[in-house]
Amino acid sequence: MKCFAVLLPMKDEEKSRSFRDQHLAFLSKMRDDGTILMNGRFVDGAGGLVIYQGDSQDEVEKIVNTDPYIINGARDYEIHEWEMVSNYNF
């Protein structure tokens, strides 16, 4: 399984507020089923970062496109395959 860093830069602050609960529920479900390793917002309000696990970038992109933030135009996204180095075992 590969890791993918998905940047979610702010596109529309009002839509981000409106769809925040749906987005957080989506992230929670994806964490619970192991698709997301971790996620968090940037404290400067610029957006957020989500670390996904998947077999390919195409697979992860399909999942990202089901995020309420993406569906509703609140955020843009950028995906990069990420070679994680950590002292933690996931």
Image (cartoon, grey):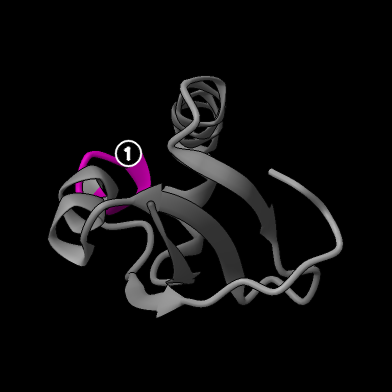
- Height in image: 61 above or below 82? above
In the image, what residue occupies the spot 46% across and 21% down? 33
Q: How many marks?
A: 1
In percent of width and height, residue 15 lies at: 41, 50
In the image, what residue occupies the spot 51% across and 34% down? 27
Q: Is residue 41 left or right of residue 5?
A: right
Q: Is residue 54 left or right of residue 65?
A: right
In percent of width and height, residue 35 lies at: 43, 37
In percent of width and height, residue 19 lies at: 44, 37
Q: Write the start and end of the magenta stretch as one range.
A: 65-70
In the image, what residue occupies the spot 45% across and 30% down? 30
> Dot 1, crowdedness within 10 Å: few (<14), some or many (≥20)?
many
User: Which amino acid type corresponds to the residue marked 1 in the rendered image?
Assistant: Pro
The verdict on residue 69 being magenta is yes
- Height in image: 19 above or below 48? above
- Height in image: 9 above or below 88? below
Quarter of the view holding residue 48: bottom right
Quickly name the residue at label 1: 68
- Height in image: 31 above or below 79? above
Pick the residue in front: 61 or 44.
61
Q: Quadrant of the C terminus?
A: top right
In percent of width and height, residue 20 lies at: 53, 38
Pick the residue in front: 17 or 70.
70
Kindly state the secondary structure of the residue where label 1 is placed.
helix
In the image, what residue occupies the spot 33% across and 70% down? 77
